């Protein structure tokens, strides 16, 4: 199914809207984590390899769909599209009829080639539809993966948009969450969620560089067992217990305390 350009929503300047979105989705069922991903938002897992060592390393669960990746470039060019480097950034080209053009597109129509999108996959970039192949040059097809979560080893799951990861590397983000949780639960500091903390620090770095911030959002799931039991009265926190999932198979599941989570509350 394809929506004709004449029916696309309009921007403030009256031109057809061309903005799609990246997406990273995590579904947790028992001990399984299912991940789907398009674009340059991403999912990072915090892993504690040695229970005697407090270090939690960052594992990038997703890979950004950049146009310069050999697989993505080959797919794009195979559909008649192209990739151009503009100001050091590789972008998928939008082959758009000149703005002064009116009427149907013909062979004689002047086509402008605009280096446009810095990701090779996204949802809703209708401009990239190729009428000859019947496919989107900017693909909406996600990469998917399945991971087994062990609450004794896996401590954090961070979902972030590119505005977060452009300013805070994955390992820094995991370390910041670990430090933030320790201060909050052991020193009694203000109850701010890990997600809000990460977004605040990322926005601060955008300001320090005197740059306009890109989309900056985050969800942080803290699945480490609690070392101290306490009340969860923050508006930004939700208590989950992976051990109670119907498919969780750990023999020690009955002895695990609830996990703490920094995601926004669920409204039912």
Image: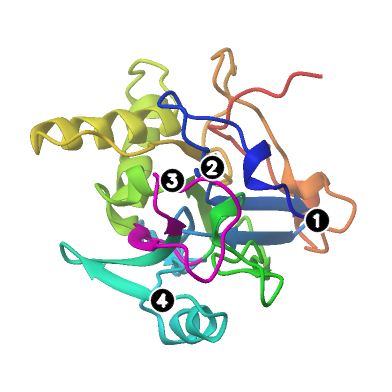
194 relative to 99, above or below: above
Q: Which is closer to the viewer, label 2 or label 3?
A: 3
Q: Main secondary structure of the magenta part?
A: loop
Find disc 1 in the rendering and name its residue. 1
Q: Position of residue 249 (x, y in %)?
A: 83, 63
At a point 46% along the width and 53% down the height, the residue shown is: 41
User: In the rendered image, which quarter is residue 178 located in?
Assistant: top left
Q: Distance of mark 2 from mark 3, alpha carbons? A: 18 Å
Find disc 3 in the rendering and name its residue. 161
Q: Distance of mark 1 from mark 4, alpha carbons? A: 24 Å
Q: Which is closer to the viewer, label 3 or label 4?
A: 4
Please report whichever mark, 2 or 3, sits nearer to the chain's N-terminal start: 3
Query: Which region shows up in magenta?
Result: 96-120
- Disc 1 vs disc 2: Cβ atoms closer than 8 Å? no
Which residue is at the front of the view, 233 or 146? 146
The local secondary structure at tag 4 comes to loop
123 relative to 229, above or below: below
Q: Residues within 10 Å of mark 4 (few under 14, many from 20)?
A: many
Q: Position of residue 88 (x, y in %)?
A: 17, 66
At a point 58% along the width and 35% down the height, the residue shown is: 260
Q: Distance of mark 2 from mark 4, alpha carbons? A: 41 Å
Q: Distance of mark 3 from mark 4, alpha carbons? A: 25 Å
The local secondary structure at tag 1 comes to loop
């Amino acid at each position: 199914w394809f929506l004709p350009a004449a029916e696309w929503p309009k921007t403030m300047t009256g031109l057809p809207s061309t903005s799609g979105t990246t997406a990273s989705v995590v579904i947790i069922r028992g001990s399984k984590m299912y991940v789907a991903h398009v674009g340059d938002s991403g999912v990072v897992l915090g892993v504690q390899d040695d229970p005697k060592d407090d270090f939690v390393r960052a594992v990038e669960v997703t890979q950004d769909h950049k146009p310069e990746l050999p697989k993505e470039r080959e797919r794009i060019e195979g559909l008649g599209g192209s990739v151009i480097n503009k100001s050091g950034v590789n972008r998928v080209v939008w082959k758009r009829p000149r703005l002064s053009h009116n009427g149907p597109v013909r062979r004689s129509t002047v086509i402008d080639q605009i280096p446009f999108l810095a990701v090779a996959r996204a949802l809703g970039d209708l401009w990239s539809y190729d009428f000859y192949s019947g496919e989107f040059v900017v693909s909406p097809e996600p990469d998917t993966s399945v991971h087994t979560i062990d609450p004794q080893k896996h401590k954090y799951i961070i979902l972030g948009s590119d505005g977060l990861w452009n300013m805070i590397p994955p390992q820094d983000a995991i370390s910041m969450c670990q430090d933030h949780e320790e201060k909050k639960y052991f020193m009694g500091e203000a109850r701010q969620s890990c997600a809000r903390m990460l977004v605040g620090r990322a926005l601060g770095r955008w300001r320090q560089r005197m740059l306009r911030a890109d989309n900056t959002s985050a969800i942080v799931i803290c699945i480490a067992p609690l070392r101290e039991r306490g009340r969860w009265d923050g508006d930004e926190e939700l208590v989950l217990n992976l051990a109670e999932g119907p498919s969780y198979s750990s023999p020690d599941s009955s002895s695990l305390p609830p996990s703490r989570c920094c995601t926004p509350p669920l409204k039912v």
